[in-house]
Image (tube, rainbow, N blue to C red):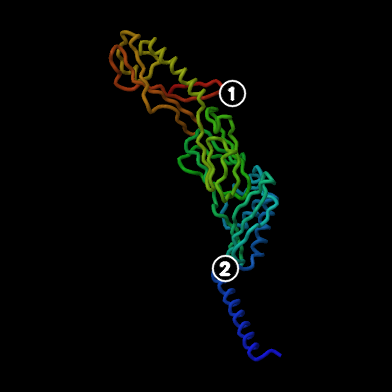
């Protein structure tokens, strides 16, 4: 039989262990809020099952996001480059009682490189709704005359302000379409790219056209005019300048400011066209414009206002570039 001294020591040790365990449980509940998460994980499983099956309306109903109808249309969603599949929760924190934060891994286009994104499931009076950090993608096209087309349906023309896209998880297809045939997103002619949504990290630009930038919350494009286009326009303006001199600075080939000055040309060999800065390519929705300005000197004197050639630029299906004066 243990001695009274041993029994007293054992009782003390058990009491100490019990107190430590109680203190440990209390601290965990107070600081982390961790608890059961099975119900929230089940909600995410159901959500991704809807997405995999293309059931965008049902999936959207499980979120706290107010989706415009056009973004959850099933035909629009099905037109995505890839829908999520093989989703699984790989990390989870929180509690079903309040909010669960989960990292979900799922396949889009490449099974060897699955996506991961963070989702939250918030319990409000027993209703669990899903959300993610950026609820909308800003589409920015502030300086390109063409239009960005999302999934072959949603068009984003040039605009001073960003347009907002409310998207379910998927790999979305963007195409840049310039009706003038003048501008491109990449020197190699690539005008298509994909964007995975949502995303936790800044994506690599390796697979994007040169003039596309994608961050965790926006897509922006700044298309450019190829050098062969400006070379062709400059050559046409050179022809106009030569014709203007042949018309003794008074004919239809001359800029309006030159004709309006109405000073007879004495010696055509004295004509000088001195290039002015601040002109070049500009764009509006569906239109590319080009201007080239000069200080004109003739007969030893300068004209008081710049001589400016300006107009629109187009390229036809055969690749012929045409400068049409305003």
For mark 2, give the secondary structure. Answer: loop
Quadrant in the rendering for residue 264: top left
Q: Which numbered disc flags the more N-terminal residue, 1 or 2?
A: 2
Quadrant in the rendering for residue 257: top left
At 31% from the left edge and 15% from the top edge, which residue is drawn? 262
Q: Quadrant of the N terminus?
A: bottom right
Picture disc at residue 152: none
> Image height check: is 214 above or below 21?
above
Crowding at mark 1 (Cα within 10 Å: few <14, some 14-19, many 20+) = few
Crowding at mark 2 (Cα within 10 Å: few <14, some 14-19, many 20+) = some
> Image height check: is 109 above or below 128?
above
Q: Quadrant of the C terminus?
A: top left
> Residue 246, how many percent across, how many down?
39, 9
Can you identify the residue that label 2 sits on?
A: 33
Q: CA distance from mark 1 to mark 2?
A: 64 Å
At 53% from the left edge and 28% from the top edge, which residue is drawn? 180
For mark 1, give the secondary structure. Answer: loop
Outermost residue, left direction? 301
Mark 1 or 2, closer to the camera: 2
At 57% from the left edge and 22% from the top edge, which residue is drawn? 319
Can you identify the residue that label 1 sits on?
A: 317
> Residue 179, how many percent across, how many down?
55, 30
Quadrant in the rendering for residue 247: top left
At 52% from the left edge and 38% from the top edge, which residue is drawn? 221
Report the label total: 2
Along the line of sight, the residue nearer the viewer: 324 or 173: 173
> Residue 175, how many percent across, how many down?
59, 37
Left or right, 92 with respect to 240, comes to right
> Residue 59, how many percent across, how many down?
64, 54
């Amino acid at each position: 039989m243990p001695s009274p001294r041993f029994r007293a020591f054992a009782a003390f040790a058990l009491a100490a262990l019990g107190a430590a365990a109680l203190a440990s449980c209390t601290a965990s509940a107070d600081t982390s809020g961790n608890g059961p998460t099975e119900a929230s994980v089940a909600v995410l499983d159901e959500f991704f099952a809807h997405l995999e099956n293309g059931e965008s309306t049902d999936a959207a109903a499980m979120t706290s996001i107010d989706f415009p109808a056009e973004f959850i249309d099933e035909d629009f969603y099905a037109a995505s480059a890839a829908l999520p599949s093989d989703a699984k929760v790989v990390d989870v924190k929180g509690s079903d009682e309040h909010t669960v934060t989960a990292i979900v891994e799922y396949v889009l286009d490449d099974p060897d490189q699955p996506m991961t994104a963070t989702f939250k499931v918030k319990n409000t009076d027993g209703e669990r709704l899903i959300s993610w950090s950026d609820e909308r993608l800003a589409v920015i096209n502030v300086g390109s005359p063409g239009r960005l087309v999302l999934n072959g349906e949603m068009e984003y023309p040039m605009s001073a302000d960003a347009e907002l896209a409310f998207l379910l998880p998927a790999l979305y297809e963007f195409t840049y379409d310039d009706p003038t045939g003048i501008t491109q997103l990449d020197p190699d002619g690539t005008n298509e790219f994909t964007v995975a949504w949502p995303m936790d990290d800044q994506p690599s630009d390796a697979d994007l056209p040169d003039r596309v930038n994608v961050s965790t919350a926006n897509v922006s494009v700044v298309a450019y005019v190829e050098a062969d286009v400006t070379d062709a326009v400059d050559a046409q303006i050179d022809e106009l300048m030569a014709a203007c001199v042949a018309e003794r600075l008074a004919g239809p080939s001359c800029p309006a400011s030159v004709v309006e000055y109405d000073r007879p040309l004495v010696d055509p060999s004295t004509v000088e066209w001195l290039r002015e800065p601040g002109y070049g390519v500009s764009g509006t929705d569906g239109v590319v414009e080009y201007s080239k300005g000069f200080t004109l000197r003739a007969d030893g004197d300068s004209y008081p206002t710049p001589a400016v050639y300006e107009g629109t630029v187009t390229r036809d299906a055969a690749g012929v570039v045409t400068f049409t004066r305003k």
